[in-house]
Amino acid sequence: MESAITSKGQATIPKAIREHLHLKPGDRVKFFVHPDGTVVLLPKLPVSALRGMLKATRHASLEEMDEAIATGVSERYRRATRR
């Protein structure tokens, strides 16, 4: 499939691609350029689309979060000072 670029730099996404990505008028898309030069077009999903993707087994307390942050910072500092 191909599409022409207009003088304004716009292109029409072919119908088969729009249907495959479930794109509707007004939806937004993201472009990613890979190091090898290939370009990927993906629909930009709203945050609400992410709901339920991860299963939380339990909630962490503020103390546990603080401890995890402190551990991460100290490990990062230790790695940085070894160089």
Image (cartoon, rainbow, N blue to C red):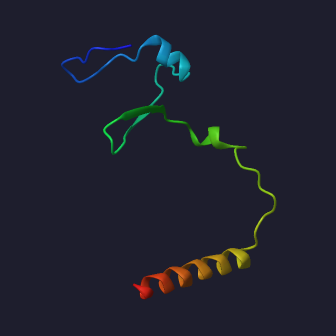
- Residue 7 in percent (x, y) is at 18, 19
Vertically, is 19 above or below 50? above
Q: Residue at x 72, y 76 (%)?
A: 64
The residue closer to the viewer here, 34 or 49, is 34
Quadrant including the C terminus = bottom left
Q: Is residue 48 left or right of residue 17?
A: right
Q: Is residue 80 left or right of residue 67?
A: left
Vertically, is 20 above or below 35? above
Q: Residue at x 31, y 38 (%)?
A: 37
Q: Residue at x 47, y 32 (%)?
A: 42
Quadrant including the N terminus = top left
> How many numbered marks are there?
0
The residue closer to the viewer here, 25 or 67, is 67
- Residue 22 in percent (x, y) is at 56, 21
- Residue 72 in percent (x, y) is at 58, 77
- Residue 73 sits in which quadrant? bottom right
Which residue, as the protein is rendered here, is positioned at the far left? 7
Q: Residue at x 54, y 16 (%)?
A: 19
